[in-house]
Amino acid sequence: MAKKTEDVRRKLAITAKKLRIKAAELAVTAREKENVRRKLVVTAAKLHRKAKELAVTAREKEDVRRKLVVTAKKLKVSRETLEKKILERTKDLDQSRVKCEAILASIGDGIVVADKEGKITYVNKTFEDMVGWKTKNVLGKYMVEVVPREDEKGEVVLLKERILSQVLSGERVIADVTQPFYYIRKNKSRFPASSIVTPILLSGEIIGIVETFRDITKEKNIDKAKTEFVSLASHQLRTPLTSIRWALASLKRDRLPDEQNYVVSGAHEAAAQMAATINKMLMISRIEMGGIDQKRTHVSLQTVIGKVVRLFDGDRERHALELAVECPRQLRARVDEQLLIEILSNLLNNAYNYTPKGGKVTIRAAQEDEMIRIDVTDTGYGIPQAEQGRIAEKFFRASNVASREEAGTGIGLYMVYNIARLIGGTISFVSEENKGTTFTLLFPS
């Protein structure tokens, strides 16, 4: 009995142990299930939130889609409107181009357009007729190759000496309107021409040039006839004027009453001015007809300037002007002294005449490499910007001095430019209205 009881006890102990193990397993499973349940709750919450987000996104996408549809319609309308405007603008541009080409073709001056390298990009009909080259044969070629330029002696003008080259390099150029030149046609004949070269600017940068030129054969023939007439008339006036001046000088030496002496002195001064004008006209005639033989000698620039200054001391005192001269004592040059005096006399006379009382005139001379440079600077009326290109034309006078009734004939600077060319030099100037002018003479030493 005791044995059976022990067996039962053992079985119960084993069963109890198994139950404890099973209970432990069930407890673990319950915890796991709770964890799973909690995770499922969290996941469900996330899914719920995601569903809401997706619903919002769907609505936003629909809004975006609708907006895109509206925008696409607007873009279509804009594109159609733009295409219509482009067609209209293209039509207007075509009409403008045709009109411009017709205008350029009908202009009596030759027109040539070149890029910044000097290669031709356009010529008009007058250019073709004037030089004998067709457009298709010149496009892309250099202007200097198509139409060479010669001076009066038949010597070819180098590229660096042509204004178009100076303009393309950005150099400020004031054209020498008295410098004669000839263009060579395709058939090798030549014709006298005058030209204007203008830079083409884009955002302040030079991208090319436009040159307009015209045949001035008729003008030169007329000018030659005028020169011959002026020369003849001047010679005919010179002899009687000399007699008049001699007679007036004799009267001045007599003891005349003050009133009569005033009249005689005025007449003598007027006769002297007329004689100076006639001498200028004769000088111009001789220059234009090639009748001047230069006598080059070694001269002291200080001495020459001193002579010129003394010639106009009376004018300087009358205008109450200050004069400053800056010239090294050793500065010398081989030049025709009388021609140099003629240039400086005209420049100094102009400076005195066109500078208000109390102003200042300065003469500076210096050596620059193989050249002599002489500047004549004044604090006078200056030259209007719009008229500076015409300052060397025969008989031209700037409007701001002509309106002041200042004495002058308009031939002095024309003569100065021509004489400067004769001695192998150049004249240039810078000027600002109501502030003054500086004329610069450069010639070989």
Image (spheres, helix red, strand yellow):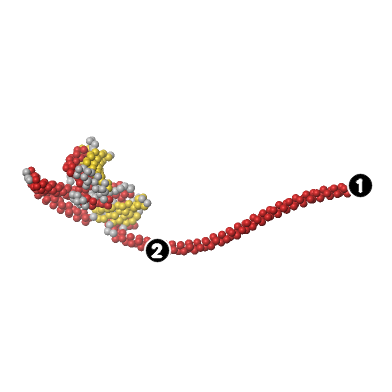
Measured in 3D between alpha carbons, the distance from the residue under mark 1 to the one under mark 2, in whole angstroms, is 122 Å
Image location of residue 138, percent across then percent down:
33, 55
Circle on res. 3: 1
Res. 345 in view: no
Quadrant (top left, top right, bottom left, bottom right) of the C terminus:
top left
* Labels 1 and 2 touching (C-beta < 8 A): no
Q: Residues within 10 Å of mark 1 (few under 14, many from 20)?
A: few
Q: Secondary structure at mark 1?
A: helix
List the residue tagged with mark 2: 88
Q: On the picture, is 197 further left or further right than 63?
A: left
Query: In the orientation shown, which residue stands out farthest toward the front?
Result: 258
Image location of residue 393, percent across then percent down:
22, 51
Mark positioned earlier in the residue sequence (1 or 2) = 1
Res. 260 in view: yes
Indicate whether 443 appears above or below 115. above
Query: In the orientation shown, which residue stands out farthest toward the right?
Result: 1
Q: Nearer the viewer, residue 390 or 418?
A: 390
Q: State the residue at coordinates (25%, 42%).
A: 375
Q: Mark 1 is on which residue type?
A: Lys
Image location of residue 235, percent across then percent down:
12, 50
Q: Mark 2 is on which residue type?
A: Glu
Circle on res. 61: none
Q: Nearer the viewer, residue 163 or 174?
A: 174
Q: Secondary structure at mark 2?
A: helix
Q: Residues within 10 Å of mark 2 (few under 14, many from 20)?
A: few
Q: Nearer the viewer, residue 42 or 414?
A: 42
Q: State the residue at coordinates (33%, 62%).
A: 99
Q: On the picture, is 130 further left or further right than 288?
A: right
Q: Nearer the viewer, residue 284 or 140?
A: 284
